[in-house]
Image (cartoon, rainbow, N blue to C red):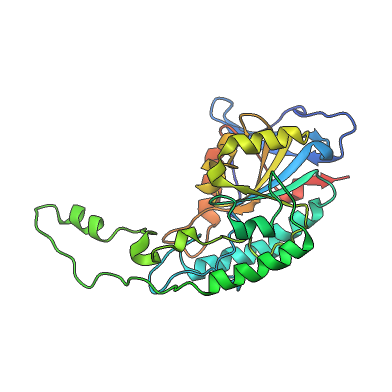
Amino acid sequence: MQPVVEVGRFEAPALVMDEDATLDVRAWRFSYNARGIIEMPNHLRGKETALIVVHPWGIDDGQGWRSPEPAGVCDFCTPVKNHLSHEHIKKVLNPFIQSARGKVSLIMYSQPGIEDPIRKKLYRSFRATPTAEERAQGEKELHEKLNSFNYTAGALPDLLHFETGTPVVEYFKQFPGLDSGDRYNGAGYWQLPNPVVKSIDRAPDDVLIYDQEGYTPLRDFLKANGIRHVLLAGYATDMCFKATAAGYENLSKDFNVFLVGDASLATFPANQGPAYATNAALSFAALNQLITQISWITFK
């Protein structure tokens, strides 16, 4: 991530001050009216804190779900970009998750879709926790389902047709920069059970959130488990991390949310890396969200 650099930086008093706090989270936000960045300490009870990871997609990671060829798109939209995100998961996200394990009340992951029969066997949800036998059966069914799909779909168009005086309009209608539909991904691709990326060392009590169920079940589950604070990590900073069921736009209505900036990556079209895109996405979020980083989080 490109470092955040601003001329004006101010220190504010602690905002969250739980008695018997077991978790220190320094955070910052930006205010145009204050003319700079405002930093503040926070002191949280770990038992009232959840770590939520948005969209750690198990794509191109050996589990069977992969980018369609020759032109399909998924996750960070090319196999090369997906590989870079997997390196980030291995080197940054997974170590952070493991450092929080046992120090926060819940570790959760959000994924697209609904609770299908296969993932129901694999992952704990709001409703149930599968047995070891069910998980083993789910792993087998997942492997069979994902590896039996035909990942060969449509190729790029050989010819474009222009019939008006606005060829630029016609060009992008015929050949947009992002088309993740059936033409390039193949029919049924988005109905496959999306697994959690295998490079995260999950535990049986980790919980899967299903986007299609919406925000309300997630909010109710968190409140029922005594959660007041959320450490939010995941992908993509400019899209899913912001606006899906477990995105910060929803969670910040009901919980004290801290965006873990370096445990996230933004999408990065036309660039070989996400450093500037992630900086920009977090900087815009900082107008109305608190941003932290892994080195600013201390588990006691």
Residue 60 in the image: above or below residue 3: below
Residue at (62% x, 33% y) in the render: 252
Name the residue at the top extreme.
Answer: 33
Residue 72 in the image: above or below residue 217: below
Looking at the image, which is closer to me, 105 or 287?
Answer: 105
Residue 227 seen anywhere in this rendered image of the structure: no
Dividing the picture into quadrants, the one containing residue 137 is bottom right
Q: How many marks?
A: 0
Residue 263 position within the rendered picture, expressed as x and y whole percent measured from the top left: 66, 53
- The quadrant in which the N terminus is found is bottom right
- The quadrant in which the C terminus is found is top right
Name the side, left or right, on which 215 lies relative to 185. Answer: right
Dividing the picture into quadrants, the one containing residue 217 is top right
Residue at (78% x, 33% y) in the render: 226
Residue 169 in the image: above or below residue 79: above
Looking at the image, which is closer to me, 132 or 96?
Answer: 132
Residue 92 position within the rendered picture, expressed as x and y whole percent measured from the top left: 69, 60
